[in-house]
Amino acid sequence: MTKGIEMSVSSTATLRGALVTRSTTATKVALVIGGIAFLGLMAQIAVPVPGSPVPVTGQTLGALLLGSAYGASLGFTTFASYLIIGFLGAPVFASGAHGLTRITGATGGYLVGMLLASLITGYLAGRKWDQKVATVVPTMVLGDLVIFSAGLFWLHHSIHATWATTFKLGFTPFILGEVIKIAIASTAMPTLWRFVPKR
């Protein structure tokens, strides 16, 4: 009984739960499709990094925002669906890329990290951590750390480089961009909550 109540509270505490009060199969499917489209568009914001197989993209920001807005369950499901259609051939990854090589290649770890980040940020959003700057900032930082931890580990083993080289190619060029993305996400979520009617 208590578990059911916790799940209900977690769901309604998210931005999606507050705005979409009727959770039916149709609304969930529509949200998943909309989320996939959002992630696909964010992925097309891609800037190559000279010498690195990892581009700067809007995907990380998309994953952080999606997880926080949708909650753990729907956020994870949506990102997983995004990965699946990309593997099946839809050009939804960075620069219109697609196929299984996206996950088996050097950048696959970042995608796995984003999947996990959508779950973690969604879980914390379900506990209202996305509603105040004091809690949303560590939420986004944690999500970003998960993304880069998985990404760097994968990149290290994929290119068979030293850890120093791995960080040089897969982390250092992205620090400023990630700080900006965290700032955007940490500002956007509490701001959006201000427009949600109090119940």
Image (tube, rainbow, N blue to C red):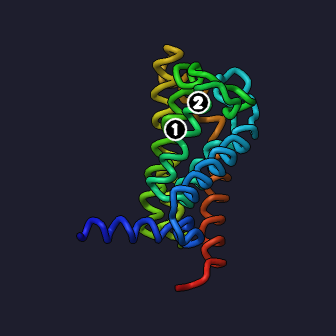
Q: Residues within 10 Å of mark 1 (few under 14, many from 20)?
A: many
Quarter that holds the N terminus: bottom left
Tell me the element at label 1: helix
| Distance between the alpha carbons at the discs numbered 2 and 1 | 8 Å
Q: Which residue is mark 1?
A: 148
Look at label 1 and name its amino acid. Answer: Phe
From the viewer's side, name the closer residue of 133 and 20. Answer: 20
User: Where does residue 165 sit, x and y in percent of width and height?
Assistant: 55, 22
Specify the amino acid type for callout 2. Gly
Q: Residue at x 45, y 55 (%)?
A: 72
Lower sequence index among marks 2 and 1: 1
Q: Is residue 2 above or below residue 140?
A: below
Query: Which residue appears farthest toward the top when viewing the image?
Result: 160
- Extreme bottom residue here? 199
User: Residue, x 56% and y 65% (percent of image)?
Assistant: 16
- The quadrant holding residue 94 is top right
Give residue 19's position: percent from left, percent from top.
59, 71
Q: Nearer the viewer, residue 148 or 189?
A: 189
Q: Nearer the viewer, residue 107 or 77?
A: 77
Q: Secondary structure at mark 2?
A: helix
- In the rendering, at what x and y percent does residue 51 appear? 69, 20
Which residue is rendered at x = 66% and y = 78% of the image? 195
User: Where is residue 47 drawn, in percent x and y?
Assistant: 76, 34
* Number of numbered discs visible in the structure rendering: 2
Q: Which residue is mark 2?
A: 170
Q: Residue at x 48, y 55 (%)?
A: 121
Q: Can residue 129 be spotted in the picture?
A: yes
Q: Is residue 61 visible?
A: no
Q: Are marks 2 and 1 in contact (CB under 8 Å)?
A: yes
